[in-house]
């Protein structure tokens, strides 16, 4: 079973960018546990994207690859927030949530 990073370990690291925090927070809200929605994207979208790659390297986010098609079919990944990523979102939720354009019900904030 993976070990969850402590608050002290997370606070010792640099914060994610505003854009990364919003992406991570939204994926956390959609996480597939308890009947919520998966977050599927094309592998090509995250492969060379520094925004996603940094979150993957820092172990806030991981993914599962789905390759059901032939050699020319696009590869799809399911983005998964790690325990460390969830802890990060819980710790900083009060700062991240006001940055969102929409609330969790989908209503525009401004």
Image (cartoon, rainbow, N blue to C red):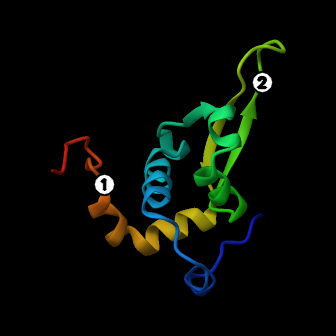
Residue 16 rendering spot, x and y as whole percentages: 52, 67
Residue furthest to the left: 110
Disc 2 and disc 1: Cα gap in Å?
A: 32 Å
Verify CB contact (< 8 Å) between mark 2 and mark 1: no
Which residue is drawn at the image coordinates 54% and 63% (left, top)? 86
Q: In the drawing, what numbered circle is on residue 52?
A: none
Residue furthest to the right: 71
Q: Nearer the viewer, residue 53 or 98?
A: 53
Residue 61 rendering spot, x and y as whole percentages: 63, 55
Side (left or right) of 36 relative to 67 = left
User: For mark 1, does the 10 Å Cα neighbourhood hold few (<14), some (14 to 19), or many (20 or more) residues?
Assistant: some
Which residue is drawn at the image coordinates 30% and 48% (left, top)? 104
What residue sits right under mark 2 in the picture?
A: 67
Tell which tag, 2 or 1, sits nearer the viewer. 1
Which residue is drawn at the image coordinates 32% and 71% (left, top)? 94
Side (left or right) of 26 relative to 81 = left
Which label's residue is closer to the chain start, 2 or 1? 2
Q: Quadrant of residue 71?
A: top right
| Secondary element at image label 2 | loop
User: For mark 2, does the 10 Å Cα neighbourhood hold few (<14), some (14 to 19), or many (20 or more) residues?
Assistant: few
Q: Give the total of numbered labels.
A: 2
Q: Quadrant of residue 48?
A: top right
Residue 107 rendering spot, x and y as whole percentages: 20, 42
Q: Quadrant of the N terminus?
A: bottom right
Q: Is residue 6 above or below residue 51?
A: below
Side (left or right) of 102 relative to 92 = left
Which residue is drawn at the image coordinates 50% and 55% (left, top)? 24
Q: Is residue 32 above or below residue 7?
A: above
| Secondary element at image label 1 | loop
What residue sits right under mark 1 in the picture?
A: 100
Residue 79 rendering spot, x and y as whole percentages: 61, 43
């Amino acid at each position: 079973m993976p070990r969850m990073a402590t608050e002290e370990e997370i606070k010792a690291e640099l914060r994610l960018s505003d854009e990364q925090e919003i992406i991570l927070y939204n994926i956390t809200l959609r996480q597939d546990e308890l009947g919520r929605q998966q977050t599927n994207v094309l592998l090509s979208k995250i492969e060379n994207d520094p925004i996603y790659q940094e979150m993957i390297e820092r172990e806030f986010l991981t993914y599962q690859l789905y390759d059901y098609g032939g050699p020319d079919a696009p590869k799809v990944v399911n983005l998964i927030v790690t325990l460390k990523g969830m802890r990060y979102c819980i710790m900083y939720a009060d700062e991240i949530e006001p940055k969102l354009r929409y609330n969790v019900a989908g209503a525009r904030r401004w």
